[in-house]
Image (tube, helix red, strand yellow):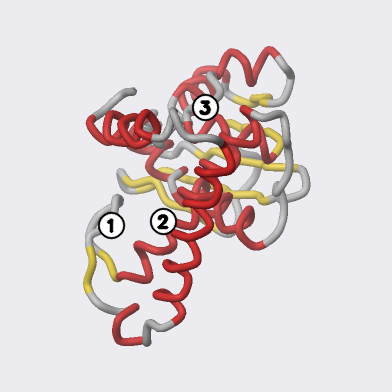
Amino acid sequence: MRNPLGQLNEDAVDLRRPRSGLEVLEEFRGATARRLASLEAMGEQELAADSWTPVGPGTYRDLLAVRVFDAWVHEQDMRGATARPGHLDGPVASHSLQRCLAAMPWVVGKAAGAPEGSSVLFEVSGPTAARLAVVVKDGRARAVEDLDGAPMARLEADFECFTRVCWGRWDLDRAVSSGRLVTGGDPQLAADVARHLAFVP
């Protein structure tokens, strides 16, 4: 537990410890059925309404997009804990990867403090793959379509490794020592960015 939200989540888990797995599963099925029915009944106006989100003000639709990511992350937590890997491709996995990649300009510019003129290329391979280039220009890091020449630093990882490092589930040493995360180019810049990949608190 790293914060008050973690404590809240742990309390909810602890409350269910005396129950059987089947009882918890039945509760889960009931809750999700009710929630899906509620969501399906929502109209465009309700989805477009102003809402709090964990990443700042937005709409209710924006909040749901974050929650899809959250649910997939915790599904992967459960798959890892029960040795049942899977769901590493498809629309939800792709959505979750895009949310991770959307944080990379912040990782490069703010967290890693990459200097003016820096360029970093992220390459994610596997069943869900993507490529993202980030440059620092005029004091701000932003994603770009293409780079003019080779990137100053490069980070390559498979989809599972990249997303697990971004969530803070795998530490960097594990990812690197396993050979599943590889850096190239300027060693200092690559190391600084890699150290700050874990953007999910």
Contact, mark 1 vs mark 2 (Cβ under 8 Å)? yes
Disc 3 residue type (three-letter): Arg
- Return the x and y of residue 101 as percentages of the image width and height: 52, 48
* Side of 160 relative to 67 (left or right): right
Question: Few, some or many C-alpha atoms within 10 Å of disc 1 (few <14, some 14-19, many ≥20)?
Answer: some
Disc 2 residue type (three-letter): Val
* Side of 15 relative to 37 (left or right): left
Q: Which quadrant of the figure has residue 39? A: bottom left
Residue at point 50%, 50% (across, down): 71
Residue at point 67%, 37% (across, down): 160
Query: Which structural element holds mark 3?
Result: loop
**Residue at the disc numbered 2:** 66
Residue at point 40%, 75% (across, down): 38
Q: Nearer the viewer, residue 100 or 190?
A: 100
- Return the x and y of residue 9 as percentages of the image width and height: 34, 36
How far is mark 1 from mark 2, CA to CA?
Answer: 8 Å
Query: Which structural element holds mark 1?
Result: loop
**Residue at the disc numbered 3:** 169
**Residue at the disc numbered 1:** 53
- Return the x and y of residue 161 as percentages of the image width and height: 65, 31
Question: Few, some or many C-alpha atoms within 10 Å of disc 3 (few <14, some 14-19, many ≥20)?
Answer: some
Q: Is residue 185 visible?
A: yes
Residue 85, placed above or below residue 187: below
